[in-house]
Amino acid sequence: MRILLVFLIPILSLADPGKNAEIFGIWTLVPPVVAIVLAFITKDVILSLFIGVFSGTFLINIINDNVFVSFIKGFVSIVERMVGSMADSWNAGIILQVLCIGGVVALVTKMGGTKAIALWLSKRAKTGIGAQISTWFMGLVIFFDDYANALIVGPIMRPITDKFKISREKLAFIIDATAAPIAGIAIISTWVGLEISLIKDGYGLVGVENINSYSIFIETIPYRFYNIFMLFFILCTVFMGREFGSMLSAERRARAGEVHSSRVSMQDVEDKTLEPKEGIKLQGSNAVVPIFTLIIGAFVSFYFSGLSSLEGEALMAAKAAPFSFETFRETFGAADASVALFQSALLATIVAITMGVWRKIFGVREAIETWVKGWKTMIITVVILLLAWSLSSVIKELGTSRYLVALLSDATPQFILPTAIFILGSFISFSTGTSYGTMGILMPLAIPLANAVGVSSGLEGEALHAYMIVSISAVLTGAIFGDHCSPISDTTILSSMGAGCSHIDHVRTQIVYALSVGGVAIGIGYLPVAFGVNVWIALPLGLFATWALVRFIGQKVEVRKI
């Protein structure tokens, strides 16, 4: 404690809230560094974020108070920041839409809609290739939530893939490798709220307050190299019938008649709360109608929300050609995404409840209980959001981004930063097992750094904007890449359970594929694009490299007819 006070005496004498970056210097890095280091050590992202926030509030208060008073005020400040985050209208909209979409997922599942679609797809699988493609396609259909994907697809497709002697490891891989990648880039999902909120806060740290974060989110999609290449990688292995690494051994073992290894001793674990009600007629419309209501409702809400925000020439042009591409671009760019998504999720809820009651699947009271239960499944997401917002506010007040900008903007090569962000994100995600927490920790640092490095490298206008986009993408995809490699990832665990596969076997077989695709994402994606290569050139080159990876490294798995 005395040593700490010795270091802090100069700080106390110079305290000035308006110049925290200069006053604290390297101490401004304490909150994010504490959060990152603890994430590695404890593998608990909530605890890590909480202590990271507390370390920042402690530093802010110690300017004017002694250590013990600052300790108490630091804790009180955490509460104030979390309450303040919830009081913000944008943040409130994000929380409500995240919770509401969780409720819609619960209703659709309880009504048996998702299971009906899955069964319809599974009946059309006539070969091993068909069974794997159906699993892959189902993962795309259940784009709105990675948990729903992991829990629903496996139990439905497991009998089909067993029939065609597809290994449980391969089934688990297809489930896991579609769950987060598709949820991460879907324009409507339980992930969108977190992603657009972090993007908005990150731009706030560089002084850009009126940014449309949903528009930025859309622009990052072509730069999500790992997500896109991984989804394509699955198709390559299926159609070419080639595997490598531990998956090759697993598939050859399965073709010999042993679909899972002798290591499997667990019973198939299924989440009973996600099962549809017994005795009801399974109808695909129970899922299709609410989900399409959610999607179409969101687009309509985006349009009118943006239209009400347009002014001057943009408004006149929109009135003159209300359905032109330019009008849609302008309205969607000016829309309040948090409100639009909440409105559409609420509309989808009403439609789902009405359908369930009309078809006598449940009463109004049970429907509301199911909806609320869906909200409960999203509580962890909300907690992470609140702590991420609080960490962002602490970092902003301490001047962390300004200190990092001064320290690294001239020292970091332009072409290295996106790759460095991607790798750092993967390490954090690997050690914590969560993509959400990784995004919350890294985004407030990545955006200011990308802006500073870009400016110091002479980028401006569209070139700087593109550089910011690729750096944001590196955060979002690096988090998913690390999550795929992590043995403590929740979706990895759920995918193993859903597929009836040994968790150790799933991790062992998947990590080789994740590292391979991650290498392609860096070598053909982030590095070239950071050098200035157009993303629409990098994407097809990356897809070709992914195909070549399977074709020339993968070995043929003998296919036997049933």
Image: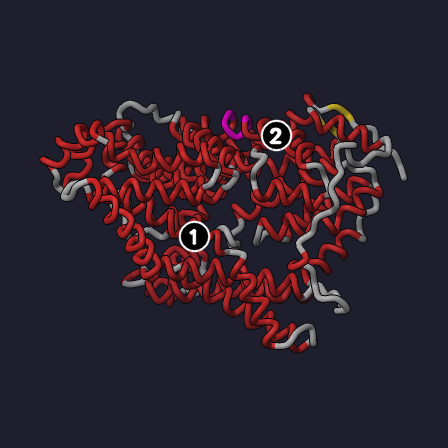
* SS state under label 1: helix
In this picture, which residue range is highlighted in magenta? 519-523
Q: Position of residue 547 (x, y in %)?
A: 65, 29
Badge 2: few (under 14), some or many (20 or more) residues near its Cα, within 10 Å? many
The residue under the point 60% across, 77% down is: 364
Our reading of the magenta stretch's main secondary structure is: helix
* SS state under label 2: helix
Q: Earlier in the sequence, mark 2 or mark 1?
A: 1
The residue under the point 74% across, 51% down is: 156
Would you name the residue on which mark 1 appears?
A: 383
Classify residue 416 as left or right of residue 535.
left
In this orientation, does residue 17 appear? no
- Extreme residue toward the left, this view: 13
Q: Nearer the viewer, residue 310 or 55?
A: 55
28 w.r.t. 98: above or below: above
Q: Quadrant of residue 326?
A: bottom left
Would you name the residue on which mark 2 appears?
A: 511
What is the three-letter code of the residue carrying label 2?
Answer: Ile
- Extreme residue toward the right, this view: 562
The residue under the point 67% across, 30% down is: 509
Badge 1: few (under 14), some or many (20 or more) residues near its Cα, within 10 Å? some
How many angstroms separate mark 2 from mark 1 (CA)?
29 Å
69 w.r.t. 30: above or below: below
Q: Position of residue 21 (x, y in %)?
A: 20, 36
What is the three-letter code of the residue carrying label 1?
Answer: Val
In this orientation, does residue 403 appear? yes
The residue under the point 43% across, 52% down is: 383
Q: Position of residue 171 (x, y in %)?
A: 72, 40
Classify residue 31 as left or right of residue 341.
left
Q: Quadrant of residue 363?
A: bottom right
Q: Position of residue 390 (x, y in %)?
A: 33, 49
Q: Which disc number belongs to residue 364?
A: none
